[in-house]
Amino acid sequence: MLGLHVGGDDYIVKPFAPAELFARIRSALRRYARLGGAAQRGGAAAGHNSAAAQLGGAAAAYNAAGRDGRVPSNGAAHNAENDADTYRVGTLVLNGRQKIVTVYGEAVNLTAFEFNILRLLIASPDRVFSSSQIYEAIRGELVCDVNRLMSVHIRHIREKIEDNPKEPRYLKVVYGLGYKVVS
């Protein structure tokens, strides 16, 4: 029941029959399509500024990267001499076209979500993004509370790219506000 109070449309309790689950999913999809689908999403939150709107150019840059593999240059982290989607901060290099992150020339294995977080942040060096702004720019949906989710992903990224994750050089937290990549 709490789910309905925080904005959920429906819920199901265990044990449930798979047929009921599928019927509820089909019903939700019918409602979504009837209300105009994704085109209507902005209208559903009438009166509220979405995080994507608040992000402005950074979300546009990230979304452009998702569609055609290129992120427009907007700052010191961009390395135009190699590739239109290559960003460099110190020894950290992100190549969006090849989906490669290197530190000291060695490849770092990031999950797709971690890669997208880092790409968004490095595309706008020194700009602070809240957890919800990051999540909305990457997933394209609003959620209530993603602070813990983002802190876990940021910690994993730091463990992979930082010499000392406890004292990060690249990926910083701005307490109470969010995260940024320092140029």
Image: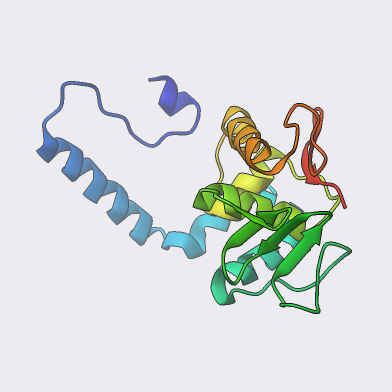
| Quadrant hosting residue 163 | top right
Report if residue 58 is visible in the image.
yes
Q: Which residue is drawn at 80% across and 77% down?
A: 80
Q: Is residue 55 above or below residue 17?
A: below
Give how far across and how far down residue 75 sits, in percent.
87, 65
Seen from the viewer's position, the closer of residues 56 and 113 is: 113
Please say if 36 is above or below 151: below
Total labels drawn: 0
Q: Residue at x 89, y 63 (%)?
A: 76
Left of 145 or right of it: where is 76?
right
Residue 53 versus residue 132: which sits nearer the camera? 132
Give how far across and how far down residue 152 sits, in percent.
59, 31
Q: In this view, does 128 lie to the left or right of 118?
A: right
Q: In this view, does 123 lie to the left or right of 134?
A: right
Q: Which residue lies furthest to the front in this view?
A: 105
Front-most of residues 94 and 71? 94
82 or 72, nearer to the observer: 82
Q: In which quarter of the image is residue 116?
A: bottom right
Which residue is located at x 23 percent, y 41 percent? 24
User: Which quarter of the figure has residue 90?
Assistant: bottom right
Report x, y in % for residue 113.
Answer: 53, 49
Q: How is the image coloured?
A: rainbow
Q: Position of residue 9 (x, y in %)?
A: 38, 37
Residue 19 position (above or below residue 70): above
Q: Quadrant of the N terminus?
A: top left
Q: Can residue 145 be seen in this view?
A: no
* Residue in view at x 40 percent, y 58 percent: 35
